[in-house]
Image (tube, rainbow, N blue to C red):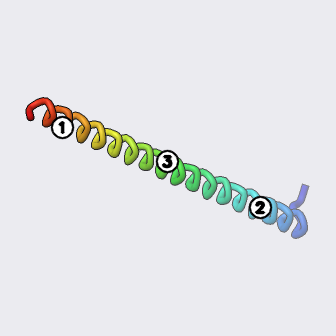
């Protein structure tokens, strides 16, 4: 069956739509990865702050006991 110009145009349009969809999905995936990285960074910072606070409490208790 010969490929007509209309068929070729339709195939080209479908390929463009699929390419755009893949690009959008890729962007969403990248955005999700960036959001997950930001959440992980926030959790790490909170853990670091909690560790620092605990170390401060411990040091204060040791200083109190040694006084």
Assess whether mark 2 and mark 3 are in contact (beta carbons under 8 angstroms).
no
Please report the residue visible at 8 percent of the width from the left and 32 percent of the height from the top: 66
Per the image, the residue denoted by label 3 is 39
- Residue 42 shown left or right of residue 4 in the figure: left
- Most extreme residue toward the top, as rendered? 65
- Residue 44 shown left or right of residue 51 in the figure: right
- Most extreme residue toward the left, as rendered? 66
Measured along the vertical axis of the image, is residue 61 above or below residue 38? above
Lower sequence index among marks 3 and 2: 2
Examine the image and state in which quarter residue 14 appears: bottom right
Q: Position of residue 34 (x, y in %)?
A: 51, 54
Rounded to the nearest angstrom, the CA distance separating label 2 from label 1 is 62 Å
Foreground tag (1 vs 3): 1
Closest to the observer, 27 or 54: 54
Per the image, the residue denoted by label 2 is 17
Foreground tag (3 vs 2): 3
Please report the residue visible at 38 percent of the width from the left and 44 percent of the height from the top: 44
Closest to the observer, 50 or 31: 50
Tell me the crowding category of disc 2: few under 14, some 14 to 19, or many 20 or more residues within 10 angstroms, Cα based.
few
Lower sequence index among marks 1 and 3: 3
Please tell me whether mark 2 sits on a helix, a strand or a loop: helix
Tell me the crowding category of disc 3: few under 14, some 14 to 19, or many 20 or more residues within 10 angstroms, Cα based.
few
Q: Position of residue 12 (x, y in %)?
A: 78, 64
Foreground tag (2 vs 1): 1
Please report the residue visible at 74 percent of the width from the left and 57 percent of the height from the top: 18
Closest to the observer, 5 or 1: 5
- Residue 57 shown left or right of residue 33 in the figure: left
Per the image, the residue denoted by label 1 is 59
Please report the residue visible at 58 percent of the width from the left and 55 percent of the height from the top: 31
Report the quarter where the C terminus lies: top left
């Amino acid at each position: 069956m010969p490929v007509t110009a209309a068929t070729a145009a339709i195939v080209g349009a479908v390929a463009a739509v699929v390419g755009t969809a893949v690009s959008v999905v890729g962007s969403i995936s990248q955005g999700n990865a960036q959001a997950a990285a930001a959440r992980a960074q926030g959790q790490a910072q909170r853990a670091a702050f909690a560790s620092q606070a605990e170390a401060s409490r411990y040091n204060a208790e040791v200083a109190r006991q040694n006084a």
